[in-house]
Structure formats: C-alpha cells, structure tokens
Amino acid sequence: MRCALELARRAFQLGEVPVGAVVVKDGKVVGQAHNEKEKRQDATAHAEILAIQRASQALGTWRLHDAVLYSTIEPCPMCAGAIIQARIKRVVFGARDLKAGAGGSLINLLDFPGLNHKVEVTEGVLEQECTELMTGFFRELRRGG
C-alpha cells in the first residue's frame, strides 16, 4: 500500500486525482500506475485499470488469479468491473469513496450476487494518509492552485 500511496503522491504533483494502484502476484509487484486521465485525456485511464493492463502485459495473461490489487481509494464501478474480469483474488484499499465506491460504499460490485467472480476486500489500510492526500488535492483545486 505504501507503493500505491507514493504513486498517488506523484499523481498529485502532476495535477491528476491522486490515486495509485499496485498489482502483486506471488509477492512481486507486476503492475503499478497512478491516474493519467488528464495526461491522456482518457476517462478510462484510472490507476487500477492501468495497473491491471501492466500486470497482464508483464505476466502474458489477462487472468490475474491469486493477484492482489492495492489502491489508495475504493475502486469505482468501471475499475471494479475490470477487477472482476481480470479474476483478481483480493482488493486492498485505503479510503472509501462515498460518491462512486463500488467495493461497499455506494454499491458492492466486487461481491455482487450473480456475477461469475467474487473478490475479497480489505479496506482501511493507511486510510488516514489516503484520505488526507485526496482531500488536500481537492482543497488545492478549489483554491485554484
């Protein structure tokens, strides 16, 4: 999670919403990213999506069985869908997203009845640091900085 938090700090410095994500398999980081929506002008360039893509490239497969995705914030519905499609075993996130969280806050797609894959969820890891980074970013944005 510390690696994801460092990636989120880098996103903050670049003017991106400060979210970082890391995919770990067999104890090794196989994919990592921070948000790149502004840089790419792409609504799908979320940290989790990019980290999953990079993990799939590194491993040569889209099936990320037994992988763990660490994210500084609760995945949104799009990212939760990608996590399910990639067959990621577990998601660990820092802060809840009360406006768009799909890991239990707003909805829970990661454990939705009828879907073909369920994802274990651990929340609240380094929650205070993740929350402070996010609130600091939006505070600066409102100030025009």
Image (cartoon, rainbow, N blue to C red):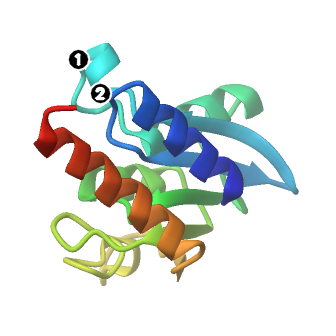
The picture places residue 143, in percent across and down from the top left corner, at 14, 41
Q: Nearer the viewer, residue 4 or 10?
A: 10
Q: Which residue is mark 1?
A: 41
Is residue 12 in view?
yes
Left or right: 95 with respect to 55? left
Q: Residue 37: which disc?
A: 2
Measured along the vertical axis of the image, is residue 71 above or below residue 30? Answer: below
Left or right: 7 with respect to 145? right
Measured along the vertical axis of the image, is residue 68 above or below residue 3? Answer: below
Measured along the vertical axis of the image, is residue 88 above or below residue 7? Answer: below
* Disc 1 element: loop
Q: Residue at x 46, y 55 (%)?
A: 83
* Amino acid type, residue under disc 1 in the picture: Gln
Q: Residue at x 19, y 77 (%)?
A: 106
Q: Are the two marked residues, 2 and 1, in contact with CB atoms closer than 8 angstroms?
A: yes
Q: Nearer the viewer, residue 82 or 141?
A: 141
Quadrant in which the N terminus appears:
bottom right
